[in-house]
Amino acid sequence: MDALFKIIFVFTLFAIELLAFQTNGTNSITLGWDKLNHTVAFMTLYLLISLSFRDFINTKYKIILLLIIAVQIEMVQSFLPNREASLLDIIADMTGVMVGYILWHKIFDYKLLYSFASKN
């Protein structure tokens, strides 16, 4: 099951990067507010990385890795036409990471998820 979560994580990361690098003139998937898009995307990435690498990467390194990804996206966007880098986007990304952290550690019964995933 871990392999499946890793594949889903990689495809999700690829999709987020692809959406982030589209120019503003193209139609793309949106939740209606750019900062909400960022928050939901990085919340999803945190949950998927937690499912994929729960025994390999601790929380500190998950957050650092997702921060690096957020900064990388903004750096690339600064070079794209009709796009710009934004510190507020990185803050929205890290808000999503924190929401994912809260969901994973406080609301989801991650021990139940862990036992389910390890059985399959």
Image (cartoon, rainbow, N blue to C red):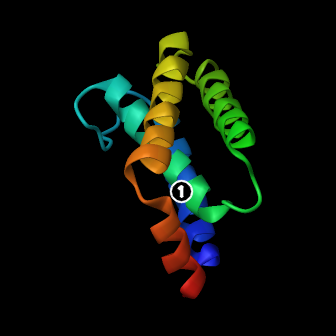
Q: Residues within 10 Å of mark 1 (few under 14, many from 20)?
A: many
Q: Residue at x 28, y 38 (%)?
A: 30
Residue 63 drawn above or below residue 34:
below
Residue drawn at the location 66% of the way across and 60% of the way down: 54
| In the image, residue 46 above or below residue 74 | below
Q: Say left or right for 43 vs 79.
A: left
Residue 78 or residue 97, whichever sits in front: 97
> Tag 1, which secondary structure?
helix
Residue type (three-letter) at the residue carrying disc 1: Leu
Q: Nearer the viewer, residue 70 or 107?
A: 107
Of 4 and 51, the residue lying toward us = 51
Question: Residue at position x 56%, y 69% from top?
Answer: 5
| The quadrant where residue 114 appears | bottom right
The foreground one among 88 and 2 is 2
**Residue 92 locus on image (x, y percent):** 45, 23
* Residue farthest left in this picture: 32
* Residue 51 visible here: yes
On-image quarter of the N terminus = bottom right
Rendered location of residue 120, percent (x, y): 54, 87
Question: Is the residue 77 above or below the residue 7 in the image?
Answer: above
In the picture provided, is 31 more to the left or to the right than 18?
A: left
- Is residue 44 in view? no
Q: Which residue is mark 1?
A: 48
Q: Is residue 57 left or right of residue 33?
A: right
Please give the count of numbered marks on the rendered protein. 1
Point out residue 118 in the picture as x, y percentages from the top left corner: 59, 80
In the image, residue 101 sits, relative to residue 75, either above or below, namely below
Q: Which of the 4 quarters of the picture holds residue 87?
A: top right
Residue at the limit of the structure toward the bottom, as seen here: 120
